[in-house]
Amino acid sequence: MHIDEQMLVERAKNDPAEFIHLYNRYVDVIFAYAQREIHDTQTAQDIVSITFTIALRKISTFRWRGTSFGAWLYKIARNEIRKQYNRNKRLKPFTDLPAEPKLDTQLNQHQLVAQIRQIMVTLSERDQEILRLCYDEALSHEEIAVILSCSTRNVAVRLHRALTRLRAKVSHLQEEDLPYATSK
Amino acid sequence: MPPQNDFSELEEALKKTTPPPTRMNPQAKAQLRQALLNEAEMKKRPFFTQIQTLSTLAFLGGIILLFIFSLRIFLNQPVTGTADNAATTSYKGQSITLPLDQYPPSTTPYRIGIEEGVTFWLINDEGTLHIFNSWSPMAGGKEPCTYSWIPANNRFEDPCSGDKWSLTGQLSLEHSYEFWSNRDLDQHPFDVRKDEITIYFEENILGTIYYPTEYGSKAAPNTNADFIVEQVNELASRWLSEVTSKNGWFYSESKVWLRGLDSEALLAQWYDLQDGGTYQTSFIQSGTTTNDLQDQTAIFNGYIYHFTIDGILEKGQLDNEYEDLGTRFLLNRLKQETELSSELIASMHVVYEQGKFILTVQLEHIHPSGLLNDQYPDVDNLILAEVSTFHIDLETGKMLDFSHFIKNESDEQIRVVEVTNLNLHFIEAPPSEVLEQLAQVEQLLLEQESTTVITTPESAQIFTRNDVKFNIDLSIWDVRSSESESQMNIVAIVDPDVWGLDLSRTPPQPILPINSSLILPEGESPAYQIGYESGIPFESNGSLEYTLIPTFPENLAVYDRFTFETAVELHNLNHSHVLFFDFTSRQEGDSWDTNIILPLGHAGIRISNIFWVRDLGNGNAEIRITVDNSSSEAFNIRCLQVETTGPVSNGCREFDSTSSFLIEVPITTPATLNVRSTIQILEPFVLSWEIQE
């Protein structure tokens, strides 16, 4: 919540034309997020368009809650993405991958890193989402809490559970010489 | 094995495999940019078209505001602590607006007080703003302790707990080893606009919580177990039982809600107890429900009447990680014939033994009507009760054993069933499992020609708000959802003594409307306005309870969270005030200066003057009554009805439009006036309900 972003938001509240600076700052971030979630460029662009239009219309209602303006945009975008899911089931993330990918059970560490995403797909969508927000979007727990409308503590618990389940699946694939099952 | 918390290599792998960021097509980006600029222009346009009117109004408004503002500053200077600058403020009860230029970046905080109970700290840390709640987070922020800024130590310190925080509100783990407070300072949300900052007090953002493992070896013995009492009380408040009657069938559902229990803090306190002995808590909850309301919902509202602490926990037992005790248990769901009355006594007992928390639950369902005799025709004696006992491992959420027996009039145990080593799980946290189990129960009920919609624990979070000022409780009691609709059952409980309600009337009062509106998360549009069914009043334990079951649109389920805003209006209360005044030695043009308080709830209005306008020549006089709203509390008197003994009534008058009432009064001595009032609470209750798909 740095002062320069506060100033940008403040200006946009007073003069809607100033919103364009916030747009410039976040458009690629939100597009990348939508693209990663949706896997459809045109739909991702639509998501971005709807997100920023809603944000412009509703910016007067935005309040600082200890996180960035971007978290609010993520939240709007996430709602739009979920609406798109409901309208069009084919947009479910990672639909190009099998639900239970066949993995080589004798992987070395490098190969396992490469296949981590396929292992991740076998987790619940809820677990996948928290992992994507944390590691793909590199968002803080506070920002994720805003996006998921839950407490920071709840984010920590959900993330911990998701990582535990992911590690369990990795361990299951490679019982021996498992890079993740050994402490540093 | 690695430490359970060490995910560093896994996290590294995830970061390495993050899909590369893609950039939006420049052409599409430019088009959207232009569209937003057009939208921004549209937003500005209406103001230009009305600029002349606005400027005139702004000028006049400015003059008035300047006057009021000056008067306010003169009369009610805000208190400032370490702030060097006097705060000029506008305070609207739930928010305050301050000029930012008076709070430049500083290495010391600004303490700002508005009135008793409304103080906060403003920190401008090189341009980054923080607004801290002035209450210490000690024991969950419920203790009446405030912390102070100690310039010599350059930190906040709480004299009650000894805890310390940095300028930016971070809890000092090094100095707060007794960890009365387990989190950073709580904050209020704020809004920066036009060189002003607006702070909203109605919301309190909890500071980051620290987990027991983060305290490490700094944990020190602490013999005070009050915190545990509070936590277990909190747990007990989540115990609910609901009895529903539908189509001649009688449903009973009991639930224990442990989700949301601050288990980490609880465990931290347990961990911190002295060596030796065992720690044991127990409480019993009981209540009675009477099913004399056909096709209505009766609610079993339990209470705690017994609570003991017997000992202390062995230190060092809890060095494992307990990530979440928030396990939910759906204890029982019974379908039984309608009976006139029944009683459910539920007792819960938490014991820590050999490194495990064991929850013992005993349910005693008493059926004085002899309902169970039909089910056990071979038992001679009248059967009074069914008793079930469960032992549950709180760490895993598994039921360890289960026993059941029925009890007759002679208190003999019959048909004792004991089951051990059950594989049956109580409902665990993942929603899919919850829904799967519930679907099975629902299917079972449907096969028995029931049309009930099952309550889903995943969405039915109980939320209660008690407004001390008005003595009204509003609760979201349960949330029911199906594929086609969702319903939320709201119960409003009104203290009849406060509001002068007449419980002898049936229904006790004509109406208690609850105006409801649904506010979706920021960024959503448009807002829904939802309808509601009429409240169904019924009397219970000397209070008035009204149920409200609004139905939500099907697509509501797509939202993660929304705020349901509910305003209670009390109409046509049978709350009349009788006034007497004397016409002796009076004539036209005379006035009675009075100070007659008409109580409304905890507040009131005041009749300040009675004026004899004219003699109407028919034995009546026209009287003008001047009424002031002397209430400092936040409700608005919408309507005042004044009647004479004639009766000559003016009917209900909008109080907003005038403070004077002209009425006809028979010229008798003493004349009698009946005054009835209707009010509206301005500040609605806000209930939050979280939906998880």
Image (cartoon, rainbow, N blue to C red):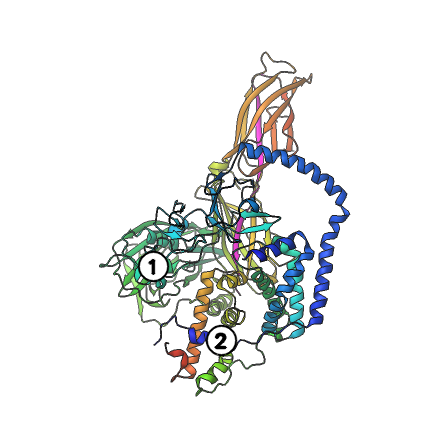
Residue B374 placement: quadrant: bottom left
Q: Toward the viewer: A160 or B125? A: B125
Q: Is residue B690 magenta?
A: yes
- Looking at the image, which residue sits at the far top? B585
Residue B533 seen in the figure: no
Q: Which residues are magenta?
A: B668-693
Nearest to N terminus: mark 1 or mark 2: 2
Instruction: Indicate left or right for A129 with B285 as reference.
Output: right
Residue B92 position within the rendered picture, expressed as x and y whole percent measured from the top left: 56, 41
Q: Position of residue A145 (x, y in %)?
A: 51, 61
Tell me if B456 is positioned left or right of B374 in this view.
right
**Any magenta on residue A31?**
no
Chain ID at mark 1:
B
Residue at horizontal 52%, vertical 65%? Answer: B449
Q: Which residue is mark 1?
A: B268
Nearest the camera: B131 or B338? B131
Task: Identify residue type, mark 1.
Answer: Ala
Residue sitting nearer the eye, A30 or B551: A30
For the point 46% across and 74% down, the residue is: B11
Label 1: which secondary element: helix
Q: Amino acid at mark 2?
A: Leu
> Could you tell me residue A133's position as x and y percent?
53, 69
Q: Which residue is mark 2?
A: B14
Q: Residues within 10 Å of mark 2 (few under 14, many from 20)?
A: many
